[in-house]
Image (cartoon, rainbow, N blue to C red):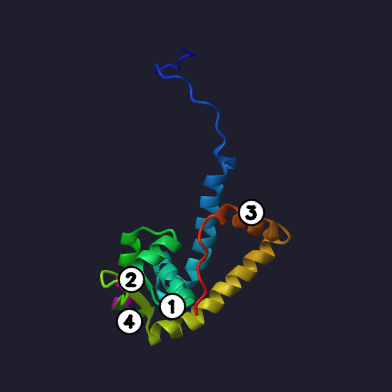
Amino acid sequence: MGAMTDHGFPPLPEFDLAHFTPYRLAVAAKRTSEELARHYRARFGISIPEWRVLVHLAHSGNVSVRDIEARVAMEKYEVSRAAKRLEDSGLIEKRVNQADRRLVDLALTPKGRLMMAELLPMARAHQDALEARMGEAFAQLEAGLAKLLEDIEPIPPKG
């Protein structure tokens, strides 16, 4: 057995967290998400989970909680909690899924659609600012993300 530390445990191997890609991706995702969240939280009073549910509904139309959970990397309880708050606010409505009556579909209400008509341009402006800030590195980031996510089923377009 190798050398022991003062506490009787083997020393830990060297590890550079600052250059560990999963850590850096998580931090970058949280920071860029939070930058946008400050704007929509101030304007609309919604949280990041609520935003994710709303934007997914705006993109995909009526979908189940299970669909959102799978697509936006949120736990079922997070989607359900966000959906409940959005329903209470009159931004979405729940409907029984006609194909599988055990599932509930979520859909934007007219009030939710009006809010998204204002919120989506804010998100687009945030994306544009991010692209401008990153310059030429943005295309490389997008290519790398596409490679990392290639085995994940894409979000189908609204149709």
Mark 1 neighbour density, 10 Å: few (under 14) some (14–19) many (20 or more): some
The residue shown at (31%, 77%) is: 98
Instruction: Say which amino acid is labelled 1.
Output: Gly
Q: Earlier in the sequence, mark 3 or mark 1?
A: 1
Instruction: Say which amino acid is labelled 2.
Output: Ala
Label 2 sits on residue: 83
Asked if labels 2 and 4 touch by Cβ distance under 8 angstroms, the answer is no
Image mark for residue 61 = 1
Q: Is residue 94 left or right of residue 42?
A: left
**Compared with residue 124, is residue 146 higher up or lower down, i.e. above or below?**
above
The residue shown at (53%, 56%) is: 29
Q: CA distance from mark 3 to mark 2?
A: 32 Å
Label 4 sits on residue: 90
- Residue 87 forms part of the magenta stretch: yes
Question: Which secondary structure lies at badge 3?
Answer: helix
Label 3 sits on residue: 144
Asked if labels 2 and 1 touch by Cβ distance under 8 angstroms, the answer is no
Mark 2 neighbour density, 10 Å: few (under 14) some (14–19) many (20 or more): many
Where residue 28 sits: x, y (%)?
55, 54
Q: CA distance from mark 1 to mark 2?
A: 14 Å
Q: Quadrant of residue 113?
A: bottom left
